[in-house]
Amino acid sequence: MHQAGDTAVQFRQAAAEDAPQAVPLIHSSGPGAFDYVFAVPGHGDAQAFLRQAFVDGAGEFGWRNHVVGELDGAVVAVGAGFGGDTKWPFTLAAARQILGHYGWRHAGGVIVRGLRVETVIPPPTGAMHYLAHLAVTPTLRGHGIGQALIHHLLAQARELGRQQIVLDVASSNPAAERLYARLGFEVSGERASRLVNAQGRVPDHRRMQCRLD
């Protein structure tokens, strides 16, 4: 149980049945990038794919990779933390999920766009522990829930013996960057983005990192 201001939020491992509340939050953590990659006319919006992948459970977007924060029985926060050792399992899971959702005709395009986004938001490598899909219900932002979520994910990283913690934040989201800075993260680099299509635009991103001693 975490006390966030006057709000008590309980964090737990996500479950498949959290999809209706968790997936919109995951999408809100990077809507431009998700729409650029996964929104395909005739196959639904990006959330349609994210719902399938979340319920499937495997990979970066599966429920097994997420924690959720509950308040009064409702999911109000979501996030993920994972290491560089997930690269190949996550890649294989994503390929399977993309092929299953889009079919052979469109899967290749989705995968290519996903690889392009990785030039702006690269996955973790080596000993990095990466925080991703960090989101709080819009009406509850500013009440300390985001800070509590990150503290929970950092505690999990400590239990795993991880020290180098990294995340990426859109340059268009200064409020999130200020939160991460207050929690000890520092900007270590910035990647410009020219990725845009009819479905979405990927903004420039800044990488931030901190060390757990």
Image: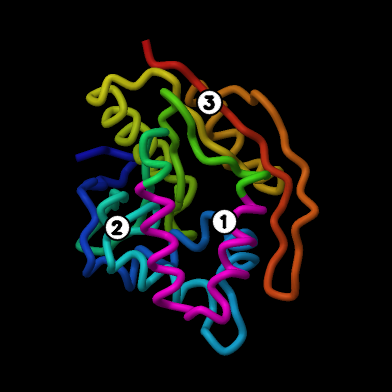
Q: Residue at x 36, y 66 (%)?
A: 53
> Depth check: 189 or 22 in front?
189
Q: CA distance from mark 1 to mark 3?
A: 21 Å
Q: Earlier in the sequence, mark 1 or mark 3?
A: 1
| Type of amino acid under label 1 | Gly
- Label 2 Cα neighbours within 10 Å, binned few <14 / some 14-19 / many ≥20: some
Q: Identify the residue under disc 2.
A: 58
Q: Are marks 1 and 2 in contact (CB under 8 Å)?
A: no
Q: CA distance from mark 3 to mark 2?
A: 32 Å
Could you tell me which secondary element the residue under label 2 belongs to?
Answer: loop
In percent of width and height, residue 164 lies at 44, 20
- Label 3 Cα neighbours within 10 Å, binned few <14 / some 14-19 / many ≥20: few
- Label 1 Cα neighbours within 10 Å, binned few <14 / some 14-19 / many ≥20: some
Q: Residue at x 25, y 53 (%)?
A: 64
Q: In the rendered view, would you say 83 is above or below 54?
A: above
Please tell me the numbered disc located at residue 30: 1
Q: Identify the residue under disc 3.
A: 182
Q: Are marks 3 and 2 in contact (CB under 8 Å)?
A: no
Q: Which residues are magenta?
A: 89-117
Q: CA distance from mark 1 to mark 2?
A: 20 Å
Q: Earlier in the sequence, mark 3 or mark 2?
A: 2
In percent of width and height, residue 130 lies at 44, 35
202 displayed left or right of 166: right
The C terminus lies in quadrant? top left
| Type of amino acid under label 2 | Ala
The N terminus lies in quadrant? top left
Say if the magenta span includes residue 102: yes
Q: Residue at x 28, y 22 (%)?
A: 158
In this rendering, which labeled residue sits more in front, label 3 or label 2?
2
